[in-house]
Image (cartoon, rainbow, N blue to C red):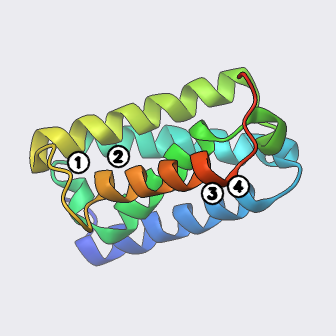
Amino acid sequence: PLIGKAYVEQIIDKLHATLSEAKGMSDAGNMEPLVTFISDVAATFFSSVKGCLLLASAEELLMTVFQLCAQDQTITHLSDALLLKLQHAYTAGIQSLITHLGAGVTEGTLLHNIAIWVKSQLLTTPLTVK
């Protein structure tokens, strides 16, 4: 690799922090170009770097991408086109995870953490038909 693992971890960590900030904003519309860039970088990273999800920051980034995809658009204010980009990034990450690490759902794994988050959302968030 051209960039050392420690530097890749720092880059992914910064991308994750920025995406988390956008997720927490009440109006992410002004963050759309930035979120678009991060979702494109994440999709490329997840699909082209073998074993990328061995990095803790990459797992955190994938979790945040999933959360943005799963939340109500009235909360995230993300466009349909951007949601498709985020779904592409999430799908690339999950495919990488399953290909390189297996699909086990044991405690502490990403898939387990996603399941816990989904359960929490179902139990605490007012749900609409969409």
Q: Which of marks 1 and 4 precedes in the sequence?
A: 4
Location of mark 4 (residue): 23
79 left or right of 2?
right
Residue occupying image coordinates x 53% and y 63%: 16
Label 1, residues with CA under 10 Å away: few <14, some 14-19, many ≥20: few
Residue 122 in the image: x percent, y percent? 59, 45
The reply to whether discs 2 and 4 touch (Cβ–Cβ < 8 Å) is no
The reply to whether discs 1 and 3 touch (Cβ–Cβ < 8 Å) is no
Q: Which mark is residue 45?
A: 2
Q: Which mark is residue 49?
A: 1
- Element on which disc 1 rests: loop
Task: Indicate whether 49 appears above or below 54.
Answer: above
Residue 7 in the image: x percent, y percent? 35, 74
Q: Quadrant of residue 127?
A: top right
Residue occupying image coordinates x 67% and y 21%: 81
32 left or right of 5?
right
